[in-house]
Image: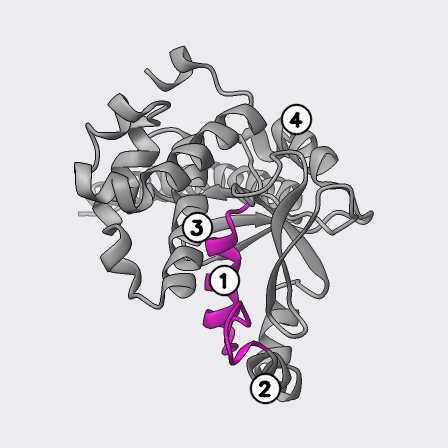
Amino acid sequence: MGYRMKKNQLVTTKSTSLILGKSKSLMGITKKILEAKSRELATHESITIIGDLMWEKETQEEMDWFEAMEYARNLTLGGYDWRLPTIEEFCQVVTSSGGIVAEYGDYRREHADENEMNEAYKSNYKAKGFHGYYWSSVTKIDSDPDESAWCIGFQSANKNHSPKSCKNYVRCVRGKKPSKISIIKRHDVEAYEALRILRAEVALERGLPTYIIFSEKTLKDMAYRFPQNKKEMLEVISKSKFEKYGDVFLEALRQYKFSNKISINEKL
């Protein structure tokens, strides 16, 4: 009996030693993982997650639009590809913060005033790291391609277009997960947003709902196909739609292509 107890004690001692050894090993591995995580978090101190997007913390200096686009193209923060946000993505930040986008129309000034007096909105957008005017990637495509682009000012949530030579702040973004828009290249997304803005302006000018001009599906198809002449545009829209609105949107797409130096091969 004594021998068996000694044997059991021996087994127990060996098992305990083995378990303790494994525990120390696991503690060492855990420490290394936590240290690596700490380094990773330190690397990403300049990133904020808002909705489905990663946002870079804003640049310290203001830039003109051309400098902003070049900065975004060259940014490799965290090993990712980055871009300037679309104007719609900025508008989503405004609404998710409790503001109302102040844009063209009868209530622009009223909405801007409401935003400036809305303390909850002010607190929310500041918590997300916004404060001034920011460049979007979207050119105002019914003007000279080198002339103006869309931007937004967070204090009043004023959505406006400014000369590209003006200085605004920059915050780049990248997708945390695939966009719901089923179009492929970055140019497609930006062109789609620009076409939506143009559609809203045409609808306002003619006193019509936006869907009467073109549906969302048609705008996405336009942004994907990138028609450059009447024949190509008629593959996207009907003849009657072309007679009413085709020339305006066709010219806008041509200007967008020229402004962003997009080659036809890049679209194929």
Q: Name the residue tied to disc 1.
A: 91
Distance from label 4 to label 2 (Cα)?
Answer: 38 Å
Look at label 1 and name its amino acid: Cys
Look at label 3 and name its amino acid: Leu
**Residue 229 screen position, x and y as percent:** 34, 23
| Residue at (39% x, 28% y) in the render | 185
Q: Earlier in the sequence, mark 3 or mark 4?
A: 4
Which element is circle 1 on? helix
Q: Earlier in the sequence, mark 2 or mark 1?
A: 1
Q: Name the residue tied to disc 2.
A: 114
Distance from label 1 to label 3 (Cα)?
Answer: 16 Å
Q: Name the residue tied to disc 3.
A: 198
**Residue 54 screen position, x and y as percent:** 51, 48
Considering the image in quadrants, where does the C terminus appear?
top left
Residue count near mark 2 (Cα–Cα under 10 Å), binned few <14, some 14–19, many ≥20: some
Distance from label 2 to label 1 (Cα)?
Answer: 16 Å
Task: Give yes or no for contact between labels 3 and 4 (Cβ–Cβ under 8 Å).
Answer: no
| Span highlighted in magenta in the image | 85-108
Give the side of residue 13 with respect to residue 78, left or right.
Answer: left
Q: Earlier in the sequence, mark 4 or mark 1?
A: 4
Badge nearest the viewer, 4 or 2: 2
Residue count near mark 4 (Cα–Cα under 10 Å), binned few <14, some 14–19, many ≥20: few
Q: Name the residue tied to disc 4.
A: 74
The magenta stretch spans residue 104: yes
Which element is circle 4 on? helix
The correct choice, above or below, for 38 with respect to 158 in the image is above
Badge nearest the viewer, 3 or 4: 3
**Residue 25 screen position, x and y as percent:** 47, 36
